[in-house]
Amino acid sequence: MTEGIVRLKRGREKPVRNRHPWIFSGAIAHAENAVDGELVRVLDHKNRFLARGYWNSKSQIQTRILAWTDEPIDKAWWRAKLQHALGLRQNYAAASAKPAYRLVNAESDFLPGLVIDRYADWYVLQALTRYIDEQKQTIADALRDVAGVENIYERSDKPARQNEGLASSNALLRGGPLPALVEIEEGLRYWVDIARGQKTGYYLDQSENRRILAGLVARRLTDGPGKARLLNVFSYTGGFAIAAGRFGSLHSVNVDASRPALELAERNFELNGFDLSAHGDTAEFVLADGFDYLRHSVRKQESFDFVVLDPPKLAPSKRQIQRAARGYKDLNMNAFRLINDGGYLMTFTCSGGISRDLFRKIVFGALADAGRQAQVIRSLSAATDHPVSLSFPEGEYLKGLLLRVF
Ligand code: SAH
């Protein structure tokens, strides 16, 4: 079968030459023999080779690029790419008997449409595009060769697949059987619900920020009097509160709108050897809307030494930015009102459309309205297993600030 060809309009080759991985329909002059979910060659308007990628006419991004040289894309190619991705993780992953990290971060690892997360001896594969979906057995084979993996579960159930004309798939791909929960260890221990949890089961992107919080909490407990108080809003399975540990001397309030997430948060405290029934004053799990809970806490004049705000994506697309900005402002303003003098706020946005600069302005607006003062102690990002490709700035979705508040 002849490979399809995608010819760009005159003057539209520059982003491709600069290694941006996406080609929108508007840049394409002509496509020949291009089949959805299969490889194509990308040429400039004079028929000169630019790249190899894959095609899907149903997607707005009709071509995603895999290689900028004319090379065969086969199992050996996949092995090399996975090895490359693994190399980075081996340089950074903390030593652990049950490691957890993102092995492949899609476009940011030069593998558009593919996410692979590792949870101890389980790997979770997420195919976001038709080509990746069709190649998943090849990818699973290459993964076995490179990482010696027997157990792979597929969590291809993101709504984004609809744009590709794909149904969702949540099933065992290889090995198994999948236990109800998989235990990982990042210093502390967590249960991950691979089949039913959010994302691929866990928010790996926050692992380093959790450690930063843990360090601060540890200091506060050495220096300060009494029990420290942490408000962990949008807690999911308790990530930040568990990492902060020090169960005996930290009181955490974990707020989330998902009951299964909170149930698992509770089990995560137990997994780390903390008996909540005996120390009921140490952790609370509140099933509530995060916005409402913050407002309610301000009304009750509560106070905390640490507040973490890790809301879901409030602006999934550019059109929602205004509304999302009001949402972030509301959350942060109420958080500022709850923080003790010299306490800390760790605040995040994972909306692609909200830039670091805009986020900082929104948080400043919230600070001004709350009548407080704050210093930026650190600018926060996703962990090192979520690299960002310089030629694909869209990949930098998680932005945060660590602030000291007065
Ligand atoms: N901080 C978490 C990850 C948070 S992800 C961690 O470290 O693992 C965002 C969380 O917000 C999800 O758990 C989701 O269930 C929750 N959520 C979404 N909308 C919410 C709302 N309106 N109020 C409270 N929680 C909400």
Image (cartoon, rainbow, N blue to C red):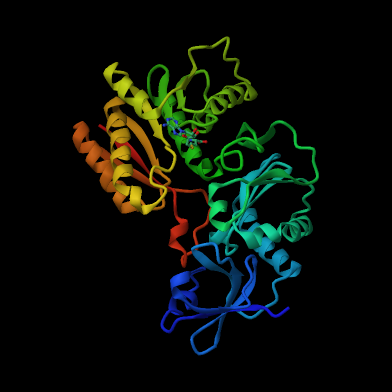
**Quadrant of the rendered structure where residue 66 is?**
bottom right
The image quadrant where one finds the C terminus is top left
227 up-or-down from 241: above or below: above
Q: Nearer the viewer, residue 406 or 171?
A: 171
Which residue extends farthest top?
A: 278
Q: Position of residue 381 (x, y in %)?
A: 44, 49
The image quarter containing residue 294 is top left
Identify whether 244 is placed above or below 79.
above
Q: Nearer the viewer, residue 305 or 321?
A: 321
* x and y percentages locating residue 203 in the rendered image: 54, 40
Residue that appears at 71% across and 69% down = 77
Please state, as top left, top right, bottom left or bottom right, where the N terminus lies in the image. Answer: bottom right
Residue 385 visible to an observer of this rendering: no
Q: Furthest residue to the bottom?
A: 46
360 left or right of 175 in image: left
Q: Residue 108: horizontal and vertical position, in percent?
A: 53, 60
Residue at the spot 67% in from the left edge and 57% down from the top edge: 133
Query: In the rendered image, is residue 359 in sight?
Result: yes
Residue found 44% across the figure and 48% down from its top: 398
Relative to 261, is 347 above or below?
A: below
Q: Locate residue 16, reporting x and y percent.
A: 49, 75
Looking at this view, is 39 or 234 the one in front?
A: 39
* Left-right relation of 336 to 385: left
Q: For the image shown, how many numbered marks are present on the structure?
A: 0
Left or right of 406? Residue 208 is right
Q: Is residue 93 left or right of residue 353?
A: right
